[in-house]
Amino acid sequence: MAAKRKKVWFDERLYDDVRQGMSVDRVLFRERTQHQDLIVFENRTYGRILALDGIVQVTERDEYVYHEMMTHVPILAHGRARRVLIVGGGDGGILREVLRHRSVERVTMVEIDRAVVDMCLKWMPSVAGRAFADRRTELIIDDGAKLVAQTKQRYDVIIVDSTDPIGPGEVLFTEKFYRDCRRCLAPGGVLVNQNGVPFLQPDEIPMTRRRRAKSFKVASFYMAAIPSYYGGLMALGWASDNATLADVPLAILRRRFAAARLKTRYYSPEIHRGCFALPAFVAELARR
Ligand code: SAM
């Protein structure tokens, strides 16, 4: 009888006393890029998985949750987004979802690590699809903090799809970065950012809110449940100067959603309205 193959495990070590294990059916690619340790591996439940510096970034099976919530909430709340900036997002999932809005005329994506784009296109093509070939896409390989500090462009929506505040992503959680983003936002614009899992990363809530509040009249959060970002609901940062943007009536959201003719698997106008209702412990963290 053939001996049972011993399982090999990928252990995500974002925390020092809890971790997420995913069995590795096959490693498709691994390299130490100029910026981070990059691995793409296969798991029966999640499909192909990208991890950077040992932290899960995107899985084929659940990527739609995060990518739909990080794009359709700000774009449908804004209502007239023409120019979008994506900071990070090398796997192309956010770019794919932004481009589904025919009203969007230009998407600039500033990603620090070319290898992430290349390896996701090669090993996880379902995530970006043809987004990088879209004539509206402008891909810049650079530090996002540098671009927002220098650009003369103005954006209606800025989406910060970064790694966690360690390594190259750390600069994307600073007060100066948020100030520079505020400078690049056109009037009525909105910034959203990856803000961690509050149950396991509670400090990220007060940390980013205080820093965003220095430059924006409204600095708050909305929630989404992403299975592979374990530890419960994930917080997504929200910043704008117009409080009504986070409180668009359901009828308007339904009208905009229908007009955009989006087929989604997580986002809905009802989820959009509900996701700004924070669990009590998150609301308390956001008051610190
Ligand atoms: N959805 C994931 C999450 O929520 O953790 C993030 C996915 S995406 C792969 C994160 C991207 O941020 C990576 O491609 C990484 O190279 C990029 N990144 C990190 N620091 C950056 C910086 N300073 N400027 C631009 N891109 C950066």
Image (cartoon, grey):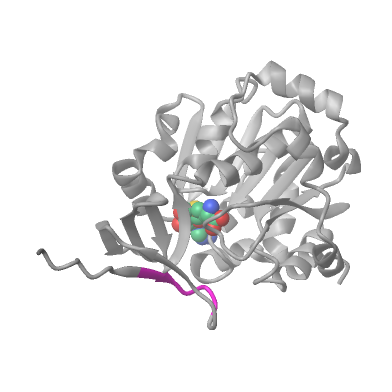
- Residue with the most extreme bottom position: 17
Image location of residue 17, percent across then percent down: 54, 83
Image location of residue 216, percent across then percent down: 83, 53
Image location of residue 21, percent across then percent down: 43, 68
Judge whether residue 13 is colored magenta.
yes
Stretch in magenta: 10-15
Q: Examine the image and state in which quarter residue 36 appears.
A: bottom left
- Residue with the most extreme left position: 1
The residue sitting at 56% across, 65% down in the picture is: 164
The quarter of the image holding the N terminus is bottom left
The residue sitting at 83% across, 24% down in the picture is: 252
Residue 237 seen from this side:
yes
- Front-most of residues 277 and 92: 277
Judge whether residue 185 is colored magenta.
no
Q: Is residue 276 left or right of residue 86?
A: right
- Front-most of residues 132 and 94: 94
The residue sitting at 88% across, 31% down in the picture is: 249
- Front-most of residues 9 and 148: 9
Image location of residue 5, percent across then percent down: 19, 66
